[in-house]
Every structure is written in structure tokens, then in C-alpha cells.
Image (tube, grey):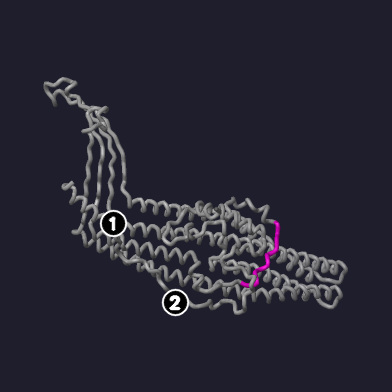
Amino acid sequence: MHKFTPLIATTALAIALSACTVGPDFVKPTMAVPDRFAEAPTVAVESTAPASDAEFWRDFNDPLLSKLVDQALESNHDLRIALSRFDHANALLRNAKLDRFPTVTAGATASDALASSDQAPGLSRGERRENSYDAGISASWELDLFVRRGVEAQRAEAWATASDLDAAQVAVVGEVANSYFQLRGLQERLLVARRNADNQKETLRLVQARLDAGRGTDFDTSRARAQLEATLSRIPALEAAAAVQMHRIAVLVGEPPEALIAELRQPAALPPLPGGIDAGTPGELLRRRPDVIAAEHRLHAITARIGVATADLFPRFTLGGLIGSQAVDSGALFQRGSETHLVALGIDWSFLDIGRVRARIAASDADAAGELARYQQTVLLALEDTENALVRYDRTREEDAHLERAASDGARAAQLARVRFQAGAADLFEVLDAERTQLQAQDAFADARTRSAAAAVGVYRAMAGGWPQHVPSRQPVAGQPGSAPVSPATAGSQASR
């Protein structure tokens, strides 16, 4: 026992040091942010306004939209890619944690060696033959004195990929909703173009009848026909644009481009928009935005890696051991006297390479400075994105109100112009001008309503809204800071329980 005292003391010291950490501790950076958004609604938001973190698409009361979003969250391939990265980071985290424990292996060998007569002259063949059997269990353990920093870095990286998955979910939901509203808006514009074409066909019929009765001219007929053809020319372009959106929606939900054409081809009106959106405060936004959360975790990871680089300034200890049995006869294995053992402690300290180590530490410091700048830029871009989304939504709603009145007045003016023309109180130019104004106003109103719906989706995307309750949260299941992220499938099953 006395012979092992220095070895035991050295091993105990190494194990004690393994609980140490070096390098800077991560401190969440702070940035000055305003108390409210500059473009926040100036009027009180209705109490029924949807919350920023609700499943916002359900507030449009469109069952087909809800179905498409649910299908996209289940089958979208971009989400599957993000999920694979999340699982990859989790696997690396588990591997990093296992590095804290010894590697244990078991093995056995049996050998039959025969020396040549030249190697053992004068001996018989049986005397030149030698058998050997051994079996044992070995363990090796590199006592990384500062392994905690490596685990800390990988855990932060795993959390960052979890936030990336959240961001992908928000992006996919927003793109599905936006494409759906674009489709419905295009279908509404198609209806406007076809209705106006029908009205212009009626105008052309009246002009042709006047010409046949000897009261019109070829000039009037040509003008009426030219306006009708111009209106009809809008229809193919709008149909093509609508088909493109159908193809986009199908791919977003994980289907071939043509899979949903029959289901989506049937026109439907744009749903009414929410009366108001509670934007919350910039501080709440930054706590919710997954891109900001991911940037924070990556800053944490790069800070921890400074400690990993700093650990190279200190010695590394390797502890190894073997327990086994050796014998020249298989029946003698594990018998008294055949046991073997080995205990070894190795120390590796590259103190003469200190220049390279310090260079790696300086490189890690530079990486951390760059990641801090990236985090601060992400915060500013998040605030900019939200301010832009709010101002677009507010201004498109104002535009809607004006264009709705213009469309209504344009339809009324066109109707009156046709009545006056039939009564002989107005010429054809007034009719054609009124019909052209009607088409432009109604088309502009349909387009503005589409942009308003897209702006509403943009606000929710900027606020990282629309978190689906049945999709894994960006929070760990246990809810404890520092716990490892779990796979989304596990998170969903545990949450359901």
C-alpha cells in the first residue's frame, strides 16, 4: 500500500482539479432598447386582439389555411433539415458529457505459437509449441481538468440549434400564410377582371347594336373592343401567378407542386383582418425572437471555448488500469496465481508550446468579440424588422380604406355612365373612361387587401408569433436552465403527458 501512496495522491489531486474551470464566465450582454415601438398603434388595441404568441393563423377563421399550416409543420422539408441539425447537436452534447467518464473495454485472446527447429535446436515439436490465454477488462480516463467548459460550449450550441428550429417554424408558418393570402388575392383580382370584362362585353354589344342600327361608328366599336381586349389580357397573367402560388403552397406542405391544385383552385375571399395587433414592448420581443436567442447561445458557446483553449496552459492527466488473467492453459484462466493488473498515471504538459497555446486563446477571444458584434447586430435587425412590419401594416390599412371607397365610387360611376349612354345623355368615351376607372380601382383594392394580409403576417413573423402548441417548444422539457435540449419528438410526448 505504501508503494501506491504517491500514485493515489497524484490521482486524487487530478480528480480534484477536474472540477475546476478556466476562462471567462458567460454574462448575457445588455443593450439599451426603447420602452415602446415607434410605430406601435396610437389607439388602444381591442381586448380581443390576438396575442403575439398565439397561433395567429387560426384568428382568420379559415379552416383550409389552418389545415395547410398544420400539414407544413408536420411535413415541410426545411423543418426536417432543421430538426436533423437539432438532433445532431444533441448527439454531440451527449458525446461531450460522456468524455467526463472512463472508457472501459473488455477483451480476450488465445494464441498457439510454434517456434522453428532453427529457433529452438534440439527441442521436439511439442517442446517448441507454446499456448497462451488471457482475458481482462481495461479502463482509460483522460482527466481533462477543465472538461466542463467543453460541455458548456456544446450545450449552448445545442440550445442555439433548438432556437434555429423555432425560427424555421416561424418562417414556414409565415410563408404558408403569406402564399395562401397571395393566392386568394390573385383569385379576387381574377374575379374583378372577369366581372369587368363581362361589363365591357355588354358595352361592346350595345355599341355594336347602335352601329348595326346606323347610329354608331366603327371608331366607337374599335375603342370598346380595344378596352375589352386589354381587360381580357390581364386574366392569363393573373392565372399564371395564382398557379405559381398553388405550386409554392404544395411544396411548403411537403407535396409535389401539382398536388393541391384541385383543392386550391376554387376561389375564396380573403378573410377579414384582425382589428388590432398587440405588439408588446421591444424587451418582450427580444426575449421571444428565436434569432436573438440563437445568437445569445452562440455567444455563450464561443465564450466557453475560450476556457477550452485556456485549459491547454495546464497539464493533462491520463489514468489507465487493467484487471485480467493470463495462463498457458485455458483451464487455468481466473485461477489463483493467474491474475494480472496494471495501474498507470500519465502526465502530458506541453509547456514549451506556450506560444501556440496563447495564440489559440487570442483567436478564441477574437471569435468571441465577433460573436458579440453579431449578437448586437441581430438585436438591431430584430427591432428594425418589427418596426418595418408595424409601419407597413398600419399604412396598408389606411390605404385599404381609401381604395375601398374608390372601388365603390368607381362601380357606381360606371353604372351611371352606362345608364346615361343608353339614354343618349353621354357619349361612349365617358362609359369607357368610367369602366377603366372602375377596373383600376377594384383591382387596386383587391391588391391592397392582399398586401394588408401579408403585412399582418409580417407583423406576427417579426414578433416571432404563431408558436404551435403541438410542436416542440424552444424551452427544455424540464424547464431548468442549463439542462440539455431534448429531441422534439421526446418534448412533444412528454408535454402531452
Work out which residue is located at the far bottom of the displayed protein and give it. Answer: 42
Q: Which residue is mark 2?
A: 32
Q: Nearer the viewer, residue 353 or 110?
A: 110
Kindly identify the residue that appears in the image at 37 percent across and 51 percent down.
Answer: 95
Kindly identify the residue that appears in the image at 43 percent across and 65 percent down.
Answer: 295
Work out which residue is located at the far left of the displayed protein and give it. Answer: 122
Residue 376's tag is: none
Q: Which residue is mark 1?
A: 18
Residue 141, compared with residue 395, is above or below; it is above
Residue 145, compared with residue 409, is above or below; it is above
Kindly identify the residue that appears in the image at 79 percent across and 71 percent down.
Answer: 220
Residue 81, compared with residue 342, is above or below; it is below
- Give residue 284's position: percent from left, percent from top: 51, 71
Work out whether residue 282 can be spotted.
yes
Q: Is residue 221 left or right of residue 321?
A: right
Question: What secondary structure prevails in the magenta region?
Answer: loop
